[in-house]
Image (cartoon, rainbow, N blue to C red):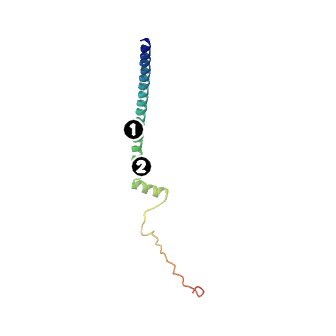
Amino acid sequence: MIRLNLVLLLAVIASAFYLVHTQYESRRLYTALDRSQAQSRKLESEHEQLQVQKRAQATPARVQQLAARQLQMRPVTPGITQYVTVFEPKPATPTETER
């Protein structure tokens, strides 16, 4: 009878240690999940801010202003337009030796 009681006592102690370990792991995993969800929300917020900045940088007025200021570009007018004509080369006629 004493041996059975000792075996049961050891089983209870082992299950208690396992329960404590399981609860510790559960808390650790929960805090890791919470941290990653917070980081995900932060990254999502940054992504939205960057999208807004991207749209602000790509407005047609801003692009035109940068083209005029930094690249010294100007709007096209008929007075400064240069037309280029492309001449297609004539096919070569076979020479006497090639016939």
Q: Is residue 95 left or right of residue 14?
A: right
The quarter of the image holding the N terminus is: top left
Whether label 2 touches label 1, CB < 8 Å: no
Can you identify the residue that label 2 sits on?
A: 54
Q: Which image quarter: residue 37?
A: top left
Which residue is painted at 40% across and 32% down in the image? 34
Q: CA distance from mark 2 to mark 1?
A: 20 Å
Position of residue 62 relative to residue 36, above or below, is: below
Q: Which mark is residue 41?
A: 1
Which residue is painted at 41% across and 27% down in the image? 27
Give the structural element (helix, strand or loop) at label 1: helix
Q: Residue furthest bottom?
A: 96
From the viewer's side, name the closer residue of 72 and 93: 93
Give the structural element (helix, strand or loop) at label 2: helix
**Mark toward the viewer: 2 or 1:** 1
Position of residue 83 relative to residue 43, above or below, is: below
Q: Which image quarter: residue 81?
A: bottom left
Q: Residue furthest right?
A: 97
- Residue 76 coordinates in the image, percent (x, y): 43, 65
